[in-house]
Amino acid sequence: MFIGKPEQHATVYAMMLSIVTLALDYATGPYVHVPILFTVPTLLASWYRGRLFGWGLALLLPLARLTLAWHWDPITPGSMTEALINALLESVILGGLASLTAACRALQHQVRVLRGMLLICSFCKKIRDHEGHWQMLEAYIMNHSEATFSHGVCSSCVQKHYGNYLQPIGRAKQTS
């Protein structure tokens, strides 16, 4: 139907699912509540489009159901209060689910974990990937996580590799 990643079409999917859910809710009549079905488009919307879109559906779907309830049966003042309270509670619960889902998505985006056993060369420290190719350690980690590298030289390696070029600290003070 749609070509591309689900993130690109999440709005369309969520709206189509919302319409189908409202149609099912309408088909069941005024006495059978199926607001649990409202969670599916709300969670989908908040996972792919964020908290605000999820909250938008969390408010829109119960209000749409309330509008459908007016169509089914004229609402008396007492039942109108109950219907408004139910719609408000459904919106708050769905909004809370939307917020939790968006927060979980944000956490998942921040955490990418390398798992499994990595085969590393004991001499050059290259890592063999799943295709059998050897890659530099830094390149492998950057390709499989969101980490980046900045290179430096530790004090023991400075001494080992550049010790002949360094002045001893005591001599530098004496010549000044």
Image (cartoon, rainbow, N blue to C red):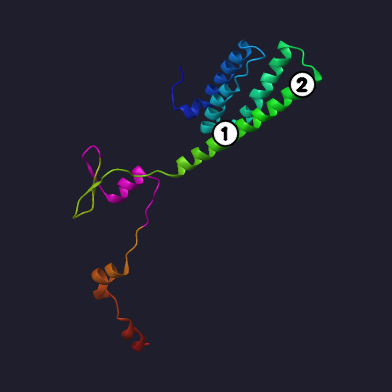
Q: In the depicted view, which residue is nearer to us: 138 or 82?
A: 82
Q: Callout 1, which amino acid?
A: Leu
Q: Between tags 1 and 2, which lies in front?
A: 2
Determine if the magenta segment contains residue 147. Answer: yes
- Residues at circles 1 and 2 in contact by the CB criterion of under 8 Å: no
Q: Callout 2, which amino acid?
A: Met
Residue 114: x and y in percent read 34, 44
Quick one: quadrant of the C terminus?
Answer: bottom left
Q: Residue furthest left?
A: 123
Q: Which mark is residue 80?
A: 2
Q: Is residue 87 left or right of residue 149?
A: right
Q: Please provide the residue range marked out in magenta.
A: 130-150
Q: In the depicted view, which residue is nearer to us: 25 or 56?
A: 25
Residue 48: x and y in percent read 51, 31
Q: Is residue 128 left or right of residue 34?
A: left
Determine if the magenta segment contains residue 36. Answer: no
Residue 40: x and y in percent read 53, 25
Please report the residue visible at 69 percent of the width from the left and 26 percent of the height from the top: 86
Number of on-image labels: 2
- Check disc 1 and report the residue beneath it: 97
Q: In the depicted view, which residue is nearer to us: 166 or 150?
A: 150
